Amino acid sequence: MGAWQPLPEELPAEVRHFVEQLRLLKDRTGMSLVALGTRTAYSKSSWQRYLNASQPPPRQAVVALCRVAGVAGEETERFGVRWELAVRAWPREPVPPVPPVPVPAGGPVPGPVAGGEPAPGAEASVPAGHGASAARGRDGYEEEPTLPWWDLLDEESSRQPAGPRAPRLLLYAALLAVVLLLAAVVGAVTLG
């Protein structure tokens, strides 16, 4: 369990502390990265990146690890605070600008050729929202994690406020009462 590769020396103290605590928490589970990936809906390779400090984990990954490790309450909150401090201090790699694709004047626009490969000098087009930057937020960590379906059910039910549901149920109950009353009146008139 404790055979972790050394963290880079240039890591800020907040990041180093957070990753070390995350590693201890992962070791506490006694799970392999594959098993952890299955239980948390984050892949083995994602956990490798998070636990080797090559990429900050999404907050939901940390919450999922806490849940699997049996951590609750104040300790989970402490991990949330450590995560926030680490994400703020995490080293940012500058994103190189994407050079524009030259379009020949009057000629065909470069695109895929036979076999699906882009023509020489042509960039493969990626639909908006489907590139690597779509999965990452401006801070470099994933904003929209993949959650297990059972977590999505809990999330959906916690999002729905109780307020609008109550008047709707009253309306349905009133409509049902009116329908039953009409059925009773129609029944009494036809029998009588």
Image (spheres, grey):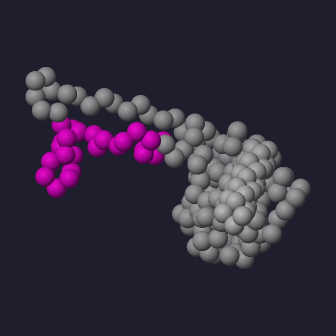
Residue 176 sits in which quadrant? bottom right
Percent across and percent down for residue 111 are: 19, 41
Toward the front, the furthest residue is 192
Toward the right, the furthest residue is 74
Q: Is residue 72 left or right of residue 65?
A: right
Percent across and percent down for residue 138 are: 58, 36
Q: Residue at x 73, y 52 (%)?
A: 178
Q: Please check the rendered image and state whether residue 188 is part of the magenta-colored stretch, yes or no.
A: no
Q: Residue at x 84, y 52 (%)?
A: 78
Seen from the viewer's position, the closer of residues 148 and 90 is 148
Q: Please check the rendered image and state whether residue 111 is part of the magenta-colored stretch, yes or no.
A: yes
Percent across and percent down for residue 46 are: 56, 60
Q: Is residue 97 above or below residue 105?
A: below
* Total count of labels: 0
Image quarter hosting the C terminus: bottom right
Seen from the viewer's position, the closer of residues 44 and 5 is 44
Toward the top, the furthest residue is 105
Q: Is residue 96 left or right of residue 106?
A: right
Residue 40 sits in which quadrant? bottom right
Image quarter hosting the N terminus: bottom right
Seen from the viewer's position, the closer of residues 171 and 66 is 171
Q: Give the residues drawn in magenta, as a range.
A: 110-133
Most frequent secondary structure within the magenta stretch: loop
Q: Residue at x 10, y 24 (%)?
A: 106
Q: Residue at x 57, y 57 (%)?
A: 146
Percent across and percent down for residue 95 are: 48, 35
